[in-house]
Image: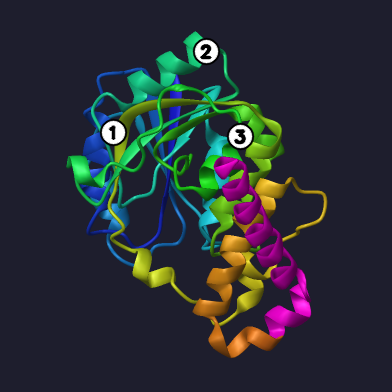
């Protein structure tokens, strides 16, 4: 059995198609937990039009997407859990692929490929081949591996010991995924299992309260070099997204950015020299 956890907040325009993609799965042994995080639109009414007993609706006071996901994990009956955003779509064999790979490989977590925005060859996320992931942070850095919501399955106990930080409202999924990637083995399946539509991405571009953004809470100490490079990518984004907060970023991270940029430059130059000789 698989538990599909969908956090829901004011996505009346997309939740119906999302739920239809779940109900259309070739793998039938699942429950779909919809956690309504205090929606003020008619999302609840739309969910209630679905009469399938596998869809379980829960309403909670608004606390953010992290609290909704953590709430869904607590409600889940299955040992294997998939998160799905309410504006994304599962391919009809998604649960079958992820569940079978989990059983075959005995991996802690299984991730698969996905489409960005629509189904077409040019929108496939990665051309990475199936197999156990040896260096997930290196692959993340080069945009070849991303176990994002909708295309990854996790054992419930892993999510219970690595919950989403509920004080964060932006990049909270990256923070949680990095914790899991640091400690657990992933298997990757090259077949696409979902469509990441990006419909609501613009709503979360910038927060006025930077204390709720992971970009202001990154920790570089005791991390591998490739994880630091991934965090550097986020830090560079922070300087672009929050130009008025550059002094605050410098207070938080000091000279860390300059040090890592220098390290990255040295690494690339050294790599080129090795290639030449």
Residue nearest the viewer, comparing 54 with 252: 252
Asked whether, in this view, residue 113 is left or right of residue 254, the answer is left
Which residue is the extreme one toward the right? 222
**What residue is at 31 percent from the left and 58 percent from the top?**
198
Mark 2 sits on what residue?
105
Q: Of the numbered discs in the image, which one, if any, rests on residue 112?
A: none
- Which quarter of the figure has residue 56? top left
Quadrant the N terminus occupies = top left
Residue 69 vertical position relative to residue 265 in the rendered view, above or below = above
Sequence-wise first label, 2 or 1: 1
Residue 251 in view here: yes
Q: Of the numbered discs in the image, which one, if any, rests on residue 135?
A: 3
Q: Which of the two marks, 1 or 3, is nearer to us in this view?
A: 3
What separation in Å lies between label 1 and label 3 (alpha carbons)?
31 Å
**What residue is at 48 percent from the left and 76 percent from the top?**
206
The rendered magenta stretch, by its main secondary structure, is classed as helix
Residue nearest the viewer, comparing 86 with 63: 86
Percent x, y of residue 109: 55, 27
Image: magenta residue range: 248-277
Which residue is the extreme one toward the bottom? 244
Mark 1 element type? helix
Mark 2 element type? helix
Asked whether, in this view, residue 258 is left or right of residue 45, the answer is right
Residue 56 among magenta residues? no
Q: Of the numbered discs in the image, which one, if any, rests on residue 22?
A: 1
What separation in Å lies between label 2 and label 1 (alpha carbons)?
24 Å
- Which quarter of the figure has residue 172? bottom right
């Amino acid at each position: 059995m698989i538990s599909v956890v969908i956090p829901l907040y004011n996505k009346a325009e997309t939740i119906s198609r999302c739920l239809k993609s779940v109900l259309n799965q070739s793998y039938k042994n699942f429950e779909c937990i919809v956690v309504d995080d205090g929606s003020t639109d008619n999302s609840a009414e739309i969910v209630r039009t679905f009469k399938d007993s596998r869809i379980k609706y829960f309403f909670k006071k608004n606390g953010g997407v992290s609290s909704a996901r953590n709430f869904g994990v607590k409600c889940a009956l299955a040992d294997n859990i998939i998160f799905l955003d309410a504006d994304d779509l599962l391919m009809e064999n998604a649960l079958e692929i992820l569940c079978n790979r989990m059983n075959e490989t005995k991996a802690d977590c299984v991730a698969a490929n996905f489409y960005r925005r629509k189904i077409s060859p040019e929108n496939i996320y990665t051309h990475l081949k199936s197999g156990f992931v040896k260096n997930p942070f290196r692959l993340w850095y080069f945009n070849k591996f991303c176990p994002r919501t909708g295309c990854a399955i996790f054992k419930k106990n892993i999510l219970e010991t690595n919950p989403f930080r509920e004080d964060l409202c932006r990049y909270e999924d990256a923070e949680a995924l990095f914790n899991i990637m640091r400690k657990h083995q992933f298997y990757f399946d090259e077949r696409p299992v979902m469509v990441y539509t990006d419909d609501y991405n613009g709503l979360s571009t910038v927060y006025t309260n930077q204390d709720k953004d992971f970009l202001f809470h990154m920790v570089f100490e005791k991390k591998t070099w490739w994880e630091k490079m991934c965090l550097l990518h986020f830090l560079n984004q922070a300087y672009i997204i929050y130009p008025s907060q550059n002094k605050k970023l410098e207070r938080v991270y000091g000279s860390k950015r300059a040090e890592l940029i220098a390290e990255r430059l040295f690494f690339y130059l050294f790599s080129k020299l090795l290639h030449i000789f």
